[in-house]
Amino acid sequence: MIPDSIGKLIKLAKAQKATDIHICAGAPILFRVGRDLIPSTQRNVTPELSKQMAFEMLTPAQVEQFQQQLDYDLMIADDEGRYRVNISQNDGFVGVVIRILPEQAKSLDELRVPPAVKKLATNTKGLILITGSTSQGKSSTMSGIIDEINTHRRKNIVTIEDPIETAHVNKKSIVRQREVGRDTKSFHTGLRAALRQDPDVIAIGEMRDYETVKIALIAAETGVLVLSTMHIISIDKMIERLLSYAPAEDQGHLRYMLAAALQGVIHQELIPDTEGGKVVACELMLATDAVKNVIRRRDGFMLRNIIHTGARYGMIAMNQSVTGLLEKGLITREVAEGVMVDY
């Protein structure tokens, strides 16, 4: 049950097309609209009110757990949607961030990703990574790929998520969604179990540790299509991020496993469109022989050159994607220049 005060905030946030709600002592309640935090109240939230609003969403047992850990994640829902909540202690005061989740999985067409992404989703084995910084729509793209497979193919899809953000209904495929902490103890234990469930597709919310990375690569090498997200600011940081999880003595083996399993990387930024919404600017790297050689040698800085010269293989550089969106009138020149300065 969502408290009335939180329910009213969520309705107001949705009306303003916000993606997140921030409740922080000493500041107004803020809505994330596009890339900006917009005040939704004139007065600052007091420490007492911030704590009260947070604890109204928790049971007494959950309050006790929060007071022990000083962080707590949960999902809340009503008839109009589902919301991911993080409650934390900041400078001694309790604060809340609420993420407004999609009401249902959006198709790849609705997400307006390049057609090459849909083609990548037809793969039957290997690893597909969706990368980007925080809040760039990675989970939505992974959900869109799952929906694409679910709509057109008869497969057994197992997801391991923390938490489950988008609920899928069975179409042509069976989609079994497992939430870390509720349905399985961790990503790597859930992944091990998934390998015994006759999977065609395994979707991992995020690869956060060496065990998860290693098992995911083994699954991808043995004929399962593995989807996962990773927080990085650019594709050329991918190799270093994955190796950072591994002990030094295992890094060489991990590079060779990654080179063998990788099918493609979708790197994206979610940018404001001309209609007040958002659109995906998408960079796509396909695992050609050149890419695999770079991964084996650990020369991540070379990936940028391969993407820029890989159009004949279907690769898309970020500046090409942004230019395409600009030419279609979907974004302004100011937005385009703001994105391309980093590429």
Image (tube, grey):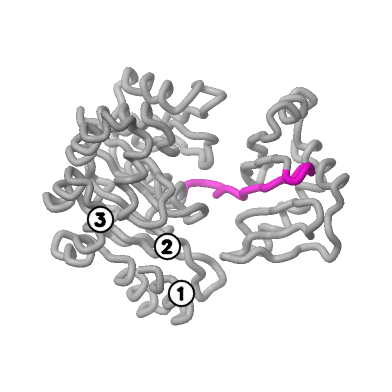
Q: Quadrant of residue 73?
A: top right
Camera sees residue 174: no
Query: Is residue 113 shown left or right of residue 182?
Result: left
Marks 2 & 1, CB-CB < 8 Å contact: no
* Residue 74 located within the stretch drawn in magenta: no
Q: Is residue 37 left or right of residue 146?
A: right
Residue at 34 percent of width and 40 percent of height? 242
Report, in whole angstroms, how far the alpha carbon at label 2 lies from the one at label 1: 14 Å
Earlier sequence position, callout 2 versus callout 1: 2
x, y percent for residue 221: 20, 31
Disc 1 to disc 3, how far (Cα)? 22 Å
- For disc 2, the marked residue is 280
Q: CA distance from mark 2 to mark 3?
A: 16 Å
- Label number found at residue 338: 1
Question: What is the crowding at mark 2: few (fewer than 14 residues within 10 Å), some, or many (at least 20)?
Answer: many
Q: Earlier in the sequence, mark 1 or mark 3?
A: 3
Q: Amino acid at mark 1?
A: Gly
| Magenta stretch in the rendered image | 90-105
**Residue type at the position of mark 3:** Met
The quarter of the image holding the C terminus is: bottom left
Farthest residue to the front: give it.
Answer: 248
